[in-house]
Structures are given as structure tokens and as C-alpha cells.
Amino acid sequence: MYRAVNREIERASKELGEKPHDQLTVVCECGQDSCSQTVDLTLAEYEQSHQQHDRFVVVPGHEDEQLERVVERNERYLVVDKFGEAEHIAETEERRQGVE
């Protein structure tokens, strides 16, 4: 659900003419139902982090080692890569939403 919200934020930013280096604030894409934290990154960083459908941007400390591994780490956010059943679910959801 959070990724869908973030994709709309990304789409709106592009429609407003924002450039790849412009800042974007998105919702943490962790699996915690009660999470409402945000992540600040550039539009280019957000696009790069989602080149694979099973990758998500999360607040540091929100990664779940049983479902994902950290593939990028910095002081502002982590990019996690799902594996196993979580990977299958993420990829299926992306296809269902028509994401290429």
C-alpha cells in the first residue's frame, strides 16, 4: 500500500516538472502496519531504488531480516530486497498494478 502512495507522489512530482536531483518525501515502505515515518531522498534515488520490483525504501531499523536483505544503506534510508515468499508477493503485486 505504501509503495502505491509513493508512486503517486513520484508521478505528481514529475508532472510538476521536478528534476532528478529534487527532493522527494515518501512514506516508509516497511511492512509494519503502524508505521507512518517518512524518508527524504531525491527523485533519482527513489527511481534507482525501485529498478527491481522486489526492492523497497525503508527507514533504518525497519528492515526485517527474515523477509529481506539490505542492498543499500545510508544515513537517510535503506533499500531492502525481498526474498522467498515475500519476493513472490511483491513481484505479483507490481504486475497486478501494471508496473513494468
Image: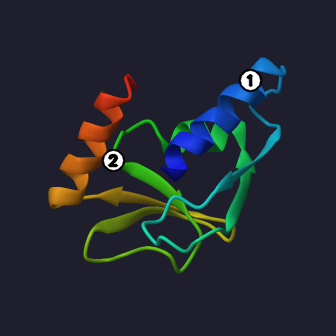
Q: Which is nearer the N-term, disc 2 or disc 1?
A: 1
Give the residue at x 44% y 36%.
Answer: 51
Front residue of 15/75: it is: 15
Type of amino acid under label 2: Asp
Q: Secondary structure at mark 2?
A: loop
Image quarter where the C terminus lies is top left
Q: Position of residue 74 (x, y in %)?
A: 62, 67
Give the residue at x 58% y 72%.
Answer: 35
Give the residue at x 79% y 36%.
Answer: 21
Q: State the residue position of label 2.
A: 54
- The total number of labels drawn is 2
Q: Position of residue 66 (x, y in %)?
A: 25, 76
The reply to whether callout 2 and callout 1 are in contact (CB within 8 Å) is: no
| Among the 4 quarters of the image, the one containing residue 19 | top right
Q: Residues within 10 Å of mark 2 (few under 14, many from 20)?
A: many
Q: State the residue position of label 1.
A: 14
| Among the 4 quarters of the image, the one containing residue 65 | bottom left
Q: Secondary structure at mark 1?
A: helix
Type of amino acid under label 1: Lys
Instruction: Indicate whether 12 appears above or below 3.
Output: above
Give the residue at x 69% y 60%.
Answer: 39
Q: Position of residue 26 (x, y in %)?
A: 68, 51
